[in-house]
Image: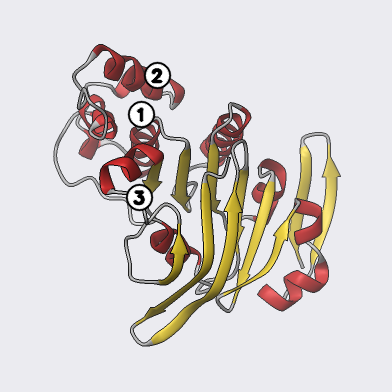
Amino acid sequence: MMVLTLTGLSVTRRRRPVLHGVNMILKPGEFVGLIGPNGAGKSSLMEAALGLIPFSGRSSLARMPPDRRARHAAYLPQAREIAWPVSVADLVALGRIPWPGGGRSGVDRIAIDAAIARMGLEPFRKRTALRLSGGEQNRALIARALAQDTPLLIADEPVAGLDPAQQLACLRLFRELAGEGRTVLASIHDLGLAARFCTRLVLLAGGHVLADGPVDGVLRDELLRRAFGISVRRIETPDGPAILPV
């Protein structure tokens, strides 16, 4: 079973080619880290896969009717804003809109409560989301995506704005979701975190997939020099690898 298939995906934005013929297949149980320099096309790949921007080629997700797509994939965009003064519980409940209960059924309440608990937001349940700190708002939006209860979670820089403890908690959660059989595609700038938590890495550079595979096969000096213009020093620790750019 394939959760997402991209074939020959190309994107042009403001008359500038951004992605060129990207092919990618995501399977259940994978936590795929999308890495690459700024401007490599990571956000464009996610948006095109979801059918949010024009593209050429094929995305199995974008071909779905909107209602089915919303039950198949949850999306956490890079620009995360909460527009209304709603409670954290009501914000998380928005993730249930694609489902028959629309946030009001018993099944919905179970999913909402589980997402709030999983993100450690129980003390903030009744607080107005706009009054949370930036990191707390980020956690609430992740909880909304979890409440959507989809096979695929697409997250654009999900740990941006989180403190180190919450970064680890977030990526540990994504790895747990993959262990439960879901699929996670997340763009990550910290190569050390990507190496530690992801089951697979996709390296984008210049709009092309430069490498796609196991962590050790992608985080090689020659590939990182081509993509970032850097080398890395890898240090093995009891908690996993540490990647130091040099």
Q: Could you tell me residue 143's position as x and y percent?
A: 38, 32
Q: Could you tell me residue 1's position as x and y percent?
A: 58, 40
Left or right: 193 in relation to 159: right
The label on residue 147 is 1
Secondary structure state at the residue bearing disc 2: helix
Q: Nearer the viewer, residue 212 or 58?
A: 58
The label on residue 64 is 3
Disc 1 and disc 2 in contact, CB within 8 angstroms? yes
Residue type at mark 3 is Met
Front label number (1 vs 3): 3
Res 129 → quadrant:
top left
Distance CA(mark 1)–CA(mark 2): 8 Å
* 119 to 191, vertically: above or below: above
The label on residue 114 is 2
Neighbourhood count class around disc 3 (C-alpha, 10 Å): few under 14, some 14–19, many 20 upward: some
Tell me what residue is drawn at x 33 percent, y 84 percent.
14
Disc 1 and disc 3 in contact, CB within 8 angstroms? no
